[in-house]
Amino acid sequence: MFFRLSSPELAALVIGATLAATAIGHLAGRSLRRRTADLHEPVGVVQTALLGFVGLILAFGLALAVGRYETRRASVVEEANAIGTTYLRAQTLTEPMRSRSLALLTDYTDTAIRLADAVPGSTDARRALADGQTLQRELWALAGRSLAAAPTASAPRLYVETLNNMIDQQTVRKAALNNRVPPAVLWFELASAMLALALLAFYLALLDRSVWTVLLAAGLVSFLLLITFDLDRPRRGLITVPATPLTDLRASMDLPPAASAP
């Protein structure tokens, strides 16, 4: 659910939920303020313990989201390196496999950039993956011809090795894009934050303290939740995985090949 929402919708959901919980706790505390003073101490102990527990939960969720974000960034760099190495080694092949492979690798880099710009699971992402797989088959067929034409040469063998690595890297990147924080963890974070804020507002209302303190806490918790959710939404939120390694590689392919044909 969180992945399908736009950024404004997600912000409205999180902020609305935390403010609603805060308001309910504050109203409940005001209604019981004059009825009993026996609740002050037990409620204070419970809300302190709960706030510490919720802090650990939020830190755990943020660590999960950051880890997955860093994995996605690393997968882009690794795929760009794999394509770049394959492109360089393709320059050592004999014609006509050399020219055809270089052109296909350029098109393959374009599909990798399209995948980086698409929302995971969307139609554009599926088309980019399908086009990339088609190009992989064509590249592998050309590599087989090159290897058959010169079975004892080292250049085709080295090229086949890096081409295989390049193909594997697309699978790694696809898995990284689809590896998100389990929705149950995100729901648990949101529910725990709402409960903690409601209890904090209830306790402060019992003590007749200002509501601004708990509103500030609600704002900070909402901000942390939004960062956690946004890190787990590549290409949908404000925090995105840059495709700079791929775009830089694609720009270098517009230059003449560094190595001449054998």
Image: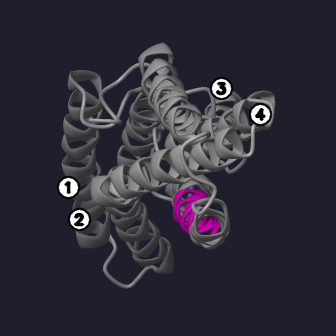
Residue found farthest to the front: 35
Residue on which disc 2 sits:
144
Residue at (52% x, 44% y) in the render: 198
Q: Which residue corresponds to the image point at 65% horizontal and 72% vertical from the top-left?
A: 45
CA separation in Å, label 1 and label 4: 62 Å
Single out the mark in the foreground, 1 or 4: 4
**Between 196 and 144, the one nearer to me in the picture:** 196
Residue type, label 3: Asp
How far separated are the C-alphas under marks 2 and 1? 5 Å
Tell me the tag on residue 141. 1
Q: Secondary structure at mark 1?
A: helix
How many residues crowd around disc 2 within 10 Å: few (fewer than 14), some, or many (20 or more)?
some
In x, y percent, where is residue 74?
Answer: 61, 60
- For badge 4, the amino acid type reads Leu
Q: Amino acid at mark 1?
A: Ala
Q: Which residues are magenta?
A: 54-66
Image quadrant of residue 34? top right
Q: Which mark is residue 254?
A: 3
**Closer to the camera, 61 or 52?**
52
- Determine which residue is flagged by label 4: 216
Q: CA distance from mark 4 to mark 3?
A: 53 Å
